Each structure stands twice: as structure tokens, then as C-alpha cells.
Amino acid sequence: MIRLEGVEKSYGHTKVLNGITFEVKSGEFISVMGSSGSGKSTLLNLIGGMDRPDRGVIWVKGENITSYSDEQLTLYRREKIGFVFQFFNLLPAITVYENIQMPLLLNGIEDRRKVLDLIRRVGLEGREDDYPHQLSGGQQQRVAIARALVHDPEIILADEPTGSLDSQTGGIIMGLLKRLVEEAGKTVVLVTHEYSVAKYAHRRIRIRDGVVS
């Protein structure tokens, strides 16, 4: 599903990724571990088409996304990728329902039944009309997970998804995320510095000093 070949990325004089090569099979859930500044979030941004490598190639389903135009990358992100972020990234002025619906609207789709089904599956039935500030951190991350899944992307990218949560809530959220993505057969790349989070993945890799070890 995903293959990186000799991927390098620098910011100024700092080389963050130095020849990253690995692959992720379809339906696989992998975690990328590393300390702060190791390049794991940069790696996620490159796979998600939010940034471009300086060198190397990223293949997704046999297509070289590093050759995509900006317009093609926008469509790739909208259609193929679901993002889950550490700080939830919910829009504060719209409701739970509207936040989850957003990826569908960006793709020109209206499917009320699908949005409500995901609200139920993440355990927020009855909170459709609430706003993000009315929810706990764990509840906000449930909204973010539903938003990431609603447009049926093939790949889920999760960047420290429990980093803003206490350990008990984080464990609940990781259990929910794993169950939902496995039921839907999604390919998942999760980055974290915590083993307690990484252990939910099928396979773990580590980035140290810009290389996979």
C-alpha cells in the first residue's frame, strides 16, 4: 500500500530524514516510534501529502505521489487519507455533527446516515449538536476519529493521537481506534514516543537520527 524509497528531508541546515526506506502492507497497522525531533511527524506529513521530500520516492498503491501536482495532492489528501491529530484540530464554531461531516462536504457528498452511524460507533450518540468546547479531551478525539473515517479513506495517519490525554483515556481511545480501523480494513501509520501506544499496532519501527532502525 505504502512504500518509501530513500526519502530525505531537511529544514534549513538540519537533515530530519536521511534515506528512509520501508513499506506498509494493505490493512497493516504500524507504529513509528521515536523521540521528539526524530522526524516521525515529518514522515507522516510526507506520506499524507502535506509536504514533499527533498529526495527519494513515496509510492501509494503503485502511484508515485512525489510526482503529483499540488492539485493532485489536494485530491489525494481529501479522498485517500484520514488524519487524527494530537490536539484534535476540530473546528470550534461548528457542532460535532458538522465537524464529522466536513470531509464528506469537501468531496461533494452528503450522507447523514453515515455521519450518525459513526457518531454512534464512537460512543457519542446524543452529542451531535454539541460544540467541541462542551466535550472532554477524550470525547473530542472520538469526534476526530469519526471525522477521519467518514469519507472512507484507505489510509489513516495518526500523529500522537493520545498525547493530549491521560493514560486511562488514551488507552480507551487507542482500543476504539484499533477496533474501528480493523473492522474497516484500513491501513494505519501511527507515530508516537510512547510504547504503551505503539503496542496497539501490528508492527513497530523506530526512527533514530533520521533513519529507520
Image (cartoon, rainbow, N blue to C red):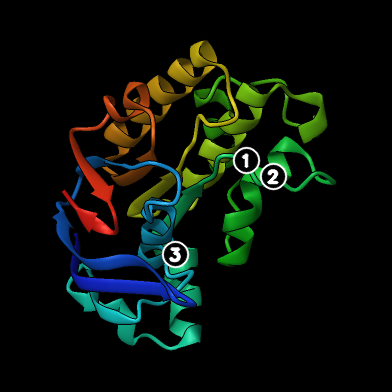
3 or 1: tag closer to the N-terminus: 3
Residue 8: give x, y in percent of width and height.
29, 73
Residue depicted at 62% across the width and 40% down the height: 88
Tell me the CA gap for discs 3 and 1: 20 Å
Residue depicted at 28% across the width and 81% down the height: 55
Q: Quadrant of the N terminus?
A: bottom left
Residue depicted at 14% across the width and 51% down the height: 25
Q: Quadrant of residue 46?
A: bottom left
Q: Say if 77 sits above or below 160 in the image.
A: below
Q: What label sits on residue 79 in the rendered view?
A: 3
Q: Which residue is mark 2?
A: 90
Do residues under tags 3 and 1 come within 8 Å of each other at their CB atoms? no
Labels 3, 1: front one: 1
Q: Say if 13 sits above or below 129 in the image.
A: below
Q: Which one is nearer the viewer's eye here, 186 or 119?
A: 186
2 or 3: tag closer to the N-terminus: 3
Element at label 1: loop
Q: Quick check: 164 left or right of 28?
A: right
Q: Which residue is mark 1?
A: 88
What amino acid is at disc 2?
A: Leu
Tell me the CA gap for discs 2 and 3: 19 Å
Residue 96: give x, y in percent of width and height.
71, 36
Q: What label sits on residue 136 in the rendered view?
A: none
Residue depicted at 38% across the width and 20% down the height: 175
Q: Quick check: 62 left or right of 102?
A: left
Residue 168: give x, y in percent of width and height.
50, 11
Do residues under tags 2 and 3 come within 8 Å of each other at their CB atoms? no
What amino acid is at disc 1?
A: Phe
Do residues under tags 2 and 1 come within 8 Å of each other at their CB atoms? yes
